[in-house]
Amino acid sequence: MSIHINEISDLEFRIAVNRVQTAILPIGSLEQHGEHLPISTDSVIIDYISTKVASEIQAFKLPVISYGISYEHKPMFNLSLQSSTLLAVLSDICCSLLEHGMKTVVILNGHHGNAGILQYVSQTMTEKILRDSNIYNLNYWQLMSDQFDHAGKVETSLLLAIAPNLVQMEKARPNTNQLQKSKIAYAAFGNAPGSFPRLTGNGVWGDPSGANVGKGFELLEEIISNIKSVIFELV
Ligand SMILES: [Zn+2]
């Protein structure tokens, strides 16, 4: 049986749900990732990670939600949902999954700007639904030892490993503004519209020049293994 829920029949689902009651729901974004990476970078990364995790822990894998909240990249390219819209979409999907017999939905998030709203999804469920089921959120970048970046060495290495055809290394450049503020000062911007290009200059956070395939696979192994460990703790 495929772990991809959209590739199986209703009958196959009804048989499988007797033993598989965990679903992995990936969410990414569509937003600028410098001149060398595609706008779908976060979605491509989290879709790949979700497929690996779901196949290794025997869970259903949902199609990736490519639309996230990325107003911080204005006026550079971003295709964004309002936070109330995204909350409604996630809540409806989770509600349907739980009604169809899932006991656990793990939302795997690939984009920083989505993180805030994810904590409210379970608050939209009825008490009855939540009595014997759970919705969990995991941000993949919190499950690796490297510092997260945006189109820098981490994301570029990940994409070189997952989809090298989508990377244009000859166009890779580091941030054009110096990033010298403290972490807490940067965090204070939250995800204010337009904050990202204002801070970084060119929309890149970090230096992609040292990115390579080996680093990408190393990161993926660490992230996938850590996500699996956390899910085993939760389920
Ligand atoms: Zn990204």
Image (cartoon, rainbow, N blue to C red):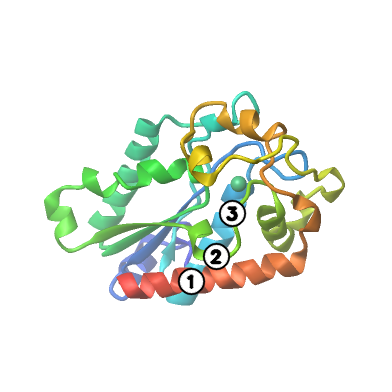
Residue 7 is left or right of residue 153, and the answer is: left
Discs 2, 3 touching: Cβ within 8 Å: yes
Which corner quadrant of the image does residue 205 belong to?
top right
Frontmost residue, 134 versus 229: 229
Height in image: 46 above or below 200?
A: below
Residue 123 is left or right of residue 15, and the answer is: left
Q: Which residue is mark 2?
A: 144
Q: In terms of secondary structure, where does tag 3 sit?
A: loop
Alpha-carbon neighbours of circle 2 within 10 Å: few (<14), some, or many (≥20)? Answer: some
Q: Residue 223's spot in the image, x, y percent?
A: 54, 67
Q: CA distance from mark 3 to mark 1?
A: 15 Å
Q: In terms of secondary structure, where does tag 1 sit?
A: helix
Frontmost residue, 87 versus 194: 194
Which corner quadrant of the image does residue 5 belong to?
bottom left
Q: Residue 197's spot in the image, x, y percent?
A: 64, 30
Height in image: 56 above or below 80?
A: below
Residue 67 seen by the camera: no
Q: Residue 54's spot in the image, x, y percent?
A: 47, 68
The three-letter amino acid code for the residue at tag 1 is Asn
Which mark identifies residue 148?
3
Q: In terms of secondary structure, where does tag 2 sit?
A: loop
Discs 2, 1 touching: Cβ within 8 Å: yes
Frontmost residue, 175 versus 171: 175
Q: Which residue is mark 1?
A: 226
The three-letter amino acid code for the residue at tag 3 is Phe
- Comparing labels 3 and 1, the label whose residue is closer to the camera: 3
The three-letter amino acid code for the residue at tag 2 is Met
Q: CA distance from mark 2 to mark 1?
A: 8 Å
Residue beneath the point at 76% across and 58% down = 211
Which mark identifies residue 195?
none
